[in-house]
Image (cartoon, rainbow, N blue to C red):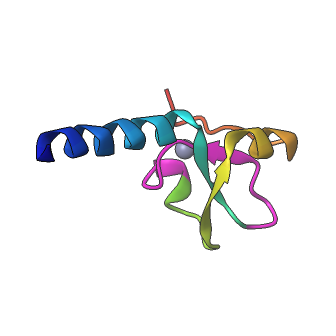
Amino acid sequence: MKTLSLLLFFFINITCKENATVYICNGPGAKKYHYTSNCRGLSNCTYKIIKEEIEKAKKDGKTLCGWEK
Ligand SMILES: [Zn+2]
């Protein structure tokens, strides 16, 4: 039973990731979104790094950061 709940926990985690949350720099000049919060493109962000749904980021005119592949 414990193993099952652990598996379920991982499954939910994966599902959440596929729900496509991205990280953006919450600054006025931010035009990119990132898959990871420790991306090189975010390292020089002087504003707050926030999580956002990828669809919303795209709607705001943001594009995938050049460091992501
Ligand atoms: Zn990035």
- Please state the horizontal and vertical placement of residue 66, each as a whole percent of the image: 59, 35
Residue at horizontal 86 percent and vertical 41 percent from the top: 59
Q: Verify whether residue 38 appears in magenta.
A: yes
Image position of 35 with respect to 68: above or below: below
Q: Residue at x 30, y 40 (%)?
A: 8
Most foreground residue, 31 or 22: 22
Q: Nearer the viewer, residue 28 or 11?
A: 11
Image coordinates of residue 45 in percent, x first then y, are 59, 65
Residue lying furthest top in this view?
Answer: 69
**In the displayed structure image, the side of residue 4 where residue 38 appears, left or right:** right
Q: Main secondary structure of the magenta part?
A: loop
32 displayed left or right of 22? right
Picture layout, residue 14 above or below residue 6: above
Region rendered in magenta: 27-41
Residue found at x 62% / y 63%: 50
Count of marks overlaid on the render: 0
Where's the N terminus, which quadrant?
top left
Q: Is residue 2 left or right of residue 48?
A: left
Position of residue 52 measured from the top left corner of the image (x, y, whole percent): 67, 53
Q: Where in the figure is residue 28, as x and y percent of width and height?
A: 81, 66
> Which image quarter has ligand 1?
top right
Q: Residue furthest front?
A: 1
Q: Nearer the viewer, residue 67 or 54?
A: 54
